[in-house]
Image (spheres, grey):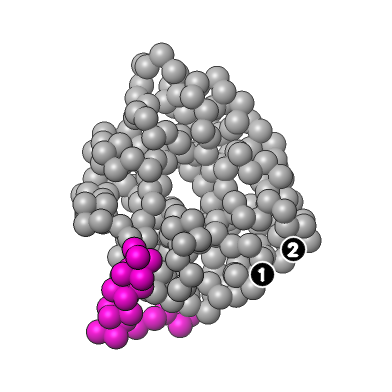
């Protein structure tokens, strides 16, 4: 298993993060098996959200005995600080944990900063002072906001959609994040299910050494596929590049 230091957080995380959104209808027993299997092969980074409440509850049970060895990334879509705090408290209760390593504000309209009327960033600062979160993250689908967040110095980690369809200016976030020592996490790695060729999707993102990728899984079979490519990564050669371009062309049409 390969690990990377997530920007200035100094958290050493597996380069593949296990996304839990698609596990909302999975039984607690199956989630326990998924967590155990992932952890045994070295995946120590789990991505969730306050909006996946039933997943967080099951995940909390599954990681309880090894909480100190697991790194959690969660977040809120709240528009007001007071609501974000409620979401955070809900996640902490569901995860049966006193803290969450990375907690994200999700926003596609503007970048929350200290002192604004929404109170979002100030509430995150308070949560960090209180030890309920360790690092403040920002999640967006808006490229200009991602760029602004990275250079602002306010956010330790950014989540942004990156996959084989990403434009050059989007991939430039990698260099910018490295420059500002910000952790960058790729979401929508399969373009919300539009990309079915896992080897190409995985190999494309694996080219970028400091990038952590979230892979949403539905069951233990999906996890086993991810594990296979972790230990048998696709070779990035001319044939790979040809197949990648063919896939891009076919999906555009």
Residue 225 image point, x, y percent: 56, 75
Residue at 40% across, 55% down:
186
Which SS class for mark 1? helix
**Residue that sits furthest to the front in the current view:** 253
Which SS class for mark 2? helix
Which label number is shown at residue 30? 2
Residue at 37% across, 26% down:
112
Compared to residue 155, the image places residue 212 above or below, namely below
Compared to residue 127, the image places residue 241 above or below, namely below
Residue 237 image point, x, y percent: 27, 84
Q: Earlier in the sequence, mark 1 or mark 2?
A: 2
In the image, residue 234 lies in the stretch drawn in magenta: yes
Q: Which residue is mark 1?
A: 220
Tag 1–tag 2 contact (CB < 8 Å): yes
**Residue in the foreground of this view, choosing between 144 and 81:** 144
Can residue 119 be seen from the camera position used here? Answer: yes
Residue 165 image point, x, y percent: 33, 60
Residue at 25% across, 56% down:
167
**Residue in the foreground of this view, choosing between 240 and 17:** 240
The prevailing secondary structure element of the residues shown in magenta is helix
Residue 184 image point, x, y percent: 35, 51
Range of the magenta residues? 231-253
Q: Residues within 10 Å of mark 1 (few under 14, many from 20)?
A: some
**Residue that sits furthest to the top in the current view:** 117
State how far apart marks 1 and 2 are (Cα). Answer: 8 Å
> Is the C terminus in the top left, top right, bottom left or bottom right quadrant?
bottom left
């Amino acid at each position: 298993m390969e690990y990377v230091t997530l920007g200035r957080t100094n958290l050493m995380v597996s380069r593949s993060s296990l996304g839990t959104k698609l596990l909302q209808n999975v039984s607690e027993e199956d989630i326990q098996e998924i967590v155990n299997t992932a952890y045994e092969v070295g995946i120590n980074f789990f991505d969730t959200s306050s909006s996946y409440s039933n997943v967080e509850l099951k995940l909390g049970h599954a990681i309880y005995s090894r909480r100190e060895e697991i790194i959690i990334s969660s977040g809120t879509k709240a528009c007001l600080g007071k609501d974000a705090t409620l979401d955070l408290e809900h996640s902490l209760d569901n995860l049966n944990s006193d803290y969450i390593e990375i907690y994200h504000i999700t926003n596609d309209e503007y970048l929350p900063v200290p002192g604004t009327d929404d109170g979002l960033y100030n509430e995150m600062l308070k949560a960090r002072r209180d030890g309920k979160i360790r690092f403040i993250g920002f999640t967006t689908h808006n490229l200009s906001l991602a760029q602004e967040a990275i250079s602002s110095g306010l956010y330790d980690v950014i989540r942004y959609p990156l996959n084989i369809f990403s434009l050059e200016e989007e991939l430039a976030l990698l260099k910018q994040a490295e420059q500002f020592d910000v952790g960058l996490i790729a979401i929508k790695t399969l373009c919300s299910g539009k990309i079915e060729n896992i080897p190409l999707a995985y190999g494309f993102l694996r080219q970028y050494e400091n990038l952590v990728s979230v892979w949403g899984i539905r069951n233990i079979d999906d996890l086993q596929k991810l594990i296979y490519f972790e230990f048998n990564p696709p070779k990035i050669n001319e044939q790979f590049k040809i197949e990648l371009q063919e896939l891009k062309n076919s999906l555009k049409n």
